[in-house]
Amino acid sequence: MKRRRCIGVFLGQPDLPFQSRLLSCVAQKAFQADCNIAVFSNMICSGGYKEYQDGEEKIMELANLDLLDAVVVLADTLQAKPDYAEMVLNRIRENFHGVKTVIDVKAEGFVDFCSDDDWMIGQLVSHLIEVHQCKDIAFMTGPAEHPHSIRRLNGYRQAMAEHGLTCDEERIFYGDFWYDEGERVVKELMASPQGMPQAIACASDTMAISVCDALKKYGIRVPEDVLITGFDCDGNGISREHMITSAIRNIDEMAERAIEYIWAQWGEETLEPLPKAERMIRTYSCGCNQYMSPIHGFMERDVSNGFFLLYNFMPEKLLSTSDIQECLWMINYYMNDIRGYHCMNLYLCENWRAMQDKQERFFSDRMLMAMEKKRDAEKNEKTYYGMDVAFPVEEMLPGLGTEEKATIYYFNALHFERHCFGYLVLGYNEDSPVHVYDNIYPAWVRHINNALESLRRLYALNELYVAAEQKAVTDIMTGMYNRNGYNLLLMDMLHGLQEKERFLIMLFDNNGLKYINDNFGHVAGDEVICKSAEIISESYYPTARLERNFRIGGDEYVKLVVGKLDEEMVEQCIETMHKRLDAINGAVDAQYPVYLAIGYALYSSEKIVSPDQIMKDVDFKMYENKQHLKEVTGFRPERS
């Protein structure tokens, strides 16, 4: 089966209006060509703290360029840190040999598709001049060196010149493309010798909104006293779009031209053109009154979706899970908050639980298929959970290119600061009602990141508790249970006998350990203890349900066994131990003998007496064997 081609898209914050609209257009064109799209994006480009941004940007390392047939880079959206966009571009330059395109900027080695901002700004300024008879128009652009600022300012200059109007440099201001500089501009205009202009054209809607808010603060009415226009409708609420006279950038055209160029480089025929939308929006702020919404509702947010309301308990529910299986189930439950997707895959690093990262790569060499979910056009769902299937991280997405229909996939890192848990893949195919996720998804992923970090710490605490508990009942030298362990486990084993089971206690003692310590040193004595413990700790009873070994004193050991046992099995065990001891003592380099005195007692459930009496019974038998052993071996270190 021929693999479907895949175009890689590298950008930041896909849920923002410009990126969202462009991706939607890219998806439409790619689906015409029966191509997949793989989107690699960081959800936060600026404003987060450094450790979080460092982890977020690592998603770019997941991209296996060998699986891509072309790339599209929105370099201007990659703003995690100053050199981040150039790092991404350099990696592609050096490692990718397919078709390379870049949108909205120019980059060496890439074919660029830039916007017509200067022309569209000219249309807005011309609208103020021709329709509203404005001659005194101030202009607020972005940062002085930014390419978008330069193009948009040029559009203003050209429109003014074409209408025979002079560009007063005192009427040109540089802002930040955001909400912070509007009041400064308004105050400077109020203080200028010419006073307030007839209109203020802004190079972004956000700056236009900040200007409107400042004008209201100083009692200047929009549009009665001053007309306002913006640019690059940001879509942060439909009411905001309709209250600022603005224009949509030629996003559709840039996306369409980029995909058509890629398609042509592959030697394919022309694709169907996308429908064109009206780009200029004439609203209340310039006096057109096409939309009569009140001008100062700008900062209202749409909170109609329950995800952002107080009664959404997704964070609490996820944090309350006690293991990864329960956490995955809860994640699946809250997938209903994400609209329109076709598939959702969650992959975890093999070492996602580790409290210290020891490997250089952010993602592990092999990834675990923790959850894979698919939804058809009728919203029938099929979900797989598991932690026992792994695949090489280079595959990125098992089955990529073999899907029934072309799909756009969004790859996002799962991480807490710089610690990587894995990644999510969210997919929309050509049948999906939408092709881009909205602003719920980044918040949804953040909740999952925090839940996985909480679970990682819970696992670590449990491991520390188990280790501490184990240390309290473990003999450090031999690895056997110690006296505390004997006291804790004895009663459980005595009272846990099942039908037809018997309880066996074996008591051991080293003959002549003091003699060995005195004549060969304590290192030799420790070696005798460890050799004895090794022999005792072997499993000798195949029918045993429980077999536990203890060092209860300096040279005293106990073996407790529960199961279907008889005297013959015990004698066979003792015979096997003697053979092991004979082999040690018969070695040519043996400097001293290793002898174990052994006593045992075998009880049925109805004959079990008190623990003290059990120990007295077996101790008496062990002492008898100790005397017998001295007679048989002639090893009597108490005699001179």
Image: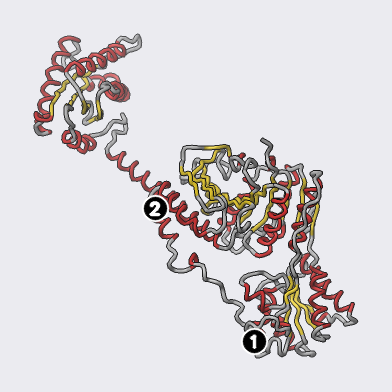
Which residue lies under the disc numbered 1? 216
Question: Residue 363 in the image: x percent, y percent?
Answer: 57, 44
Q: Is residue 617 above or below residue 181?
A: above
Q: Residue at x 19, y 22 (%)?
A: 565
**Contact between labelled residues 2 and 1, with CB atoms less than 8 Å apart:** no
Q: Residue at x 27, y 22 (%)?
A: 542
- Quarter of the image for residue 198 reads bottom right
Q: Is residue 640 found left or right of 257 in the rendered image? A: left
Q: Earlier in the sequence, mark 1 or mark 2?
A: 1
Residue at figure coordinates x 81%, y 50% from the top left = 270
Q: Under tag 2, what secondary structure?
A: loop
Residue 278 position within the rendered picture, expressed as x and y whole percent measured from the top left: 75, 70
Numbered disc total? 2
Query: Considering the image in quadrants, where does the C terminus appear?
Result: top left
Q: Nearer the viewer, residue 27 or 377?
A: 377
* Amino acid bearing label 2: Thr
Query: Which is nearer the eye, 340 or 467?
Result: 340
Cα–Cα gap, marks 1 and 2:
50 Å
Q: How is the image coloured?
A: secondary structure
Residue 413 lies left or right of residue 605; in this view the side is right
Q: Residue furthest front?
A: 378
Pick the residue in front: 297 or 490: 297
| 307 is higher (above) or lower (below) than 360 | below
**Residue 321: which disc?**
2
Q: In the displayed structure, would residue 140 be above or below residue 435?
A: below
